[in-house]
Amino acid sequence: MTKAVLICSTRLSLLLSLLAIFMTLSHAKLGTLRETSFTVFFQNRPSGPKATSVAIAGIPGQDWTYGKYGTAFATDAAMTEGFDRKTAEIGRGQGMFLTSAQDGTSLTLLLSIVFTGKEYKGSTLQIQGADHQYENPREVAVVGGTGQFRSARGYATFESFRVSKSHVVSRCNVTIQHY
């Protein structure tokens, strides 16, 4: 073995050892991996004076609706403990979605669940993925989180129920692993 190969081999061993120590310390700092499941209800108002989802962009000359390809929406909907909108608000569903399938059946969803209620106040979950809007239930990925849900990974299912023309309730079941 040449001197150069020996030096490279030694440096690689040292680097791998430091990496193993760093990873061990990172996991120790984060704590124990836990699993949490819960259900929340989004109180969506797609129309009217108190709309919680509004079209913000679309193809010029076309209607900006949920079923029209290329239409983007911003959303900020109350998240409650129960189906009835009068139950306690525990957070907000804030984000955007885009009708991304040319036939209008699928949205690309980017949603932050922002907890404001007692139990998880200050924590967030980040949801991202294809939302096949006419299917019930539909599943999207939980790709991150903060606070009590640091480094969250998992999934959320949504099932929507039309209460009236201007009120849709979406039940969201979340299952995540986090530190």
Image (cartoon, helix red, strand yellow):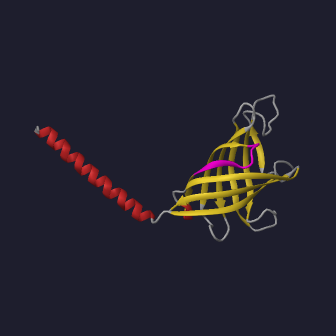
Residue 60, quarter of the rendered image: top right
Q: Which residues are magenta?
A: 133-142
In the drawing, does residue 140 fall left or right of residue 80?
left
In the drawing, does residue 124 fall left or right of residue 65?
left
Percent position of residue 154, x then y: 57, 54
Residue 37, quarter of the rendered image: bottom right
Q: Is residue 139 magenta?
A: yes
The front one of 60 and 19 is: 19
The front one of 88 and 169 is: 169
Percent position of residue 153, x then y: 55, 54
The front one of 96 and 68 is: 68
**What is the quadrant of the N terminus in the image?**
top left
The front one of 35 and 107 is: 35
Question: Which residue is at 77% across, 51% downward?
Answer: 160
Question: Which residue is at 76% across, 65% downward?
Answer: 82
Count of numbered labels shown in the rendering: 0
Q: Residue furthest top?
A: 61
Looking at the image, residue 95 lies above or below residue 104:
below
Q: Is residue 66 magenta?
A: no
Question: Which residue is at 56% across, 61% downward?
Answer: 149
Q: Residue furthest bottom?
A: 118
Percent position of residue 32, x then y: 46, 65
Residue 171, quarter of the rendered image: bottom right
Question: Which residue is at 68% across, 68% downward?
Answer: 117
